Image (spheres, grey):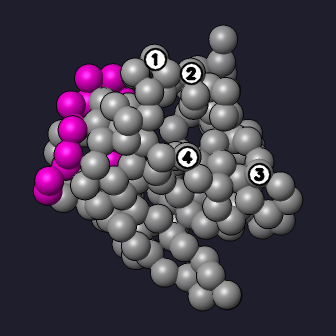
Amino acid sequence: QIVSSWFYNNDSSNGAVYGRLYDWYAATDARVLAPAGWHVPNEFEWAALIDYLEGEYMAGGKLKATTLWNLPNTGATNESGFTALPGGCLQIENYYFYFTGKGRTGFFWSASEYGYSYAWNRYISNSCSPVFRYHDDKENGFSVRCIKDI
């Protein structure tokens, strides 16, 4: 499998603000993304963070940056210091790909798989406070946050 990453709309100026979007293979390949001593969080680690932030209905707002999101940026406080940005995503469907959601959504990979072709992720929207759990095609391009090894 070839690992891939993209700038939103293939525009490097988006990378300066939002970073890159990675397919799941790149996100979970230690040679590609995470620096030594860091890793992409798995489902247990995401769940622990969300529980700490008082559950999925409150966590999205506590994870979101207070700027760069389209209005209304519901519930955004960034009190966690996570500073989630609305980098959008690259969706791949039926051999077509398209960038969508910059300013409105942030998708973040989990290291945990959901079957052969899918993996778990977390999704945050400008229009509400929750953080949602989904599984998507591993070839989609999502943001990544690494956490320090313990």
* Residue type (three-letter) at the residue carrying disc 1: Tyr
* Sequence-earlier tag: 3 or 4: 3
Residue drawn at x 47%, y 65% is 89
Name the foreground residue: 23 vs 37: 23
Mark 2 and mark 3: span between their CA atoms?
19 Å
* Sequence-earlier tag: 3 or 1: 1
Query: Quadrant location of residue 48?
Result: top right
* Residue type (three-letter) at the residue carrying disc 4: Arg
Residue drawn at x 32%, y 64% is 102
Question: Chief secondary structure of the magenta span?
Answer: loop
Q: Residue furthest top?
A: 150
Q: Are marks 2 and 1 in contact (CB under 8 Å)?
A: yes
* Residue type (three-letter) at the residue carrying disc 2: Ala
* Sequence-earlier tag: 2 or 4: 2
Residue position marked by numbered label 4 in the rendering: 133
Q: Residue 1 at x, y = what percent?
A: 83, 65
Q: Residues within 10 Å of mark 4 (few under 14, many from 20)?
A: some
Residue position marked by numbered label 2 in the rendering: 48
Residue position marked by numbered label 1 in the rendering: 52
Q: Are marks 2 and 4 in contact (CB under 8 Å)?
A: no
Residue 114 located within the stretch drawn in magenta: no
Q: Residue 114 at x, y = what percent?
A: 77, 51
Q: Are marks 2 and 3 in contact (CB under 8 Å)?
A: no
In the displayed structure, would residue 89 be above or below residue 68? Answer: below
